[in-house]
Structure formats: C-alpha cells, structure tokens
Image (cartoon, helix red, strand yellow):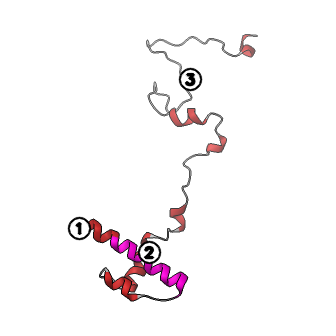
Amino acid sequence: EPVALALERMLAMRSYMRAKTIDGRLDESIATRVGLTGAAIDDMYKVMAIANYEDRFVIPTSHREWSEDAQDLRGSCGFSFGNGCSGGSTETNLFGTKQTKRPTNPMEIA
C-alpha cells in the first residue's frame, strides 16, 4: 500500500510537471487525485528530480590520469607486508627473510 501510493505520487509529479512545463498549464486536479497540492509537487520535484551541482559529478579521489597501471593502483591496497599501498615491490618474502634482488630489467644486468 505505501509503495503503491509513493509510485502513484511520483507518476502524478511527472504528469503535473509535464503539464506545467510543456503545456503551460497548472492542473491542480492531478495533485489532488493523490492527496497533494501543487506546491508539494513542486517541492518533490526540487528534491527528487533536480540534482544539485555537487551531486551531478563525482570528484575522483586520486589523479587516475597520472597512473601508468590503473589496475595496479586499484588493487594495490589489499594485503601487504607493512609497506602500505604499494605496487607489489617489497623487501621481505613470505618466509620472513630479506628478499634477494634479482635483476629483471636487461638494463640492470649490465
């Protein structure tokens, strides 16, 4: 019952605002059919249909355009060995000893 009434009121809001903006007429009978007034429908429209400027856009939490590896940036804050949000490089290994540095880049070998 409450859900059906809410949906009827939202449909009435849509019909009322369509008649107001497109047809240029205020049809109070639409509002009274669902137990509202025209002013109440205007207030509903401001709250439910028109988003504030700050609600329209999501501000990113970091500069994703500077990320070379976005998947790494997204998933690097999981389990770590105390080095925070890292790209996967750590000084320790799973067995607790210091990790030996192995050259992975051909330029590091020379």
Q: Earlier in the sequence, mark 2 or mark 3?
A: 2
Q: Earlier in the sequence, mark 1 or mark 3?
A: 1
Nearer the viewer's eye, disc 2 or disc 3?
2
- Percent across and percent down for residue 96 are 44, 14
Q: What residue is drawn where x is 44% and y is 75%?
A: 14
Secondary element type, mark 1: loop
C-alpha gap between disc 1 and disc 3:
58 Å
Residue 20 is inside the magenta segment: yes
Q: Earlier in the sequence, mark 2 or mark 1?
A: 1
Q: Which mark is residue 14?
A: 2
Q: Label 1 sits on what residue type?
A: Glu
Q: What residue is drawn where x is 64% and y is 38%?
A: 67
Q: Label 3 sits on what residue type?
A: Ser
Q: Label 2 sits on what residue type?
A: Arg
In the image, which residues are magenta?
8-24
Q: What residue is drawn where x is 31% and y is 70%?
A: 6
C-alpha gap between disc 2 and disc 1:
20 Å
Q: Nearer the viewer, residue 86 or 45?
A: 45
Q: Is residue 82 above or below residue 33?
A: above
Q: Quadrant of residue 106?
A: top right
Q: Nearer the viewer, residue 26 or 108?
A: 26
Q: Is residue 17 above or below residue 79?
A: below
Mark 2 nearby-residue class (10 Å; few <14, some 14–19, many ≥20): some
Question: Seen from this angle, which residue lies furthest left?
Answer: 1
Q: What residue is drawn where x is 51% and y is 13%?
A: 98
Examine the residues drawn in magenta and state their main secondary structure.
helix
Q: Nearer the viewer, residue 90 or 45?
A: 45
**Which residue is label 3 attached to?**
89
Residue 22 is inside the magenta segment: yes
- Percent across and percent down for residue 55 are 50, 63
**Which residue is label 1 attached to?**
1
Secondary element type, mark 3: loop
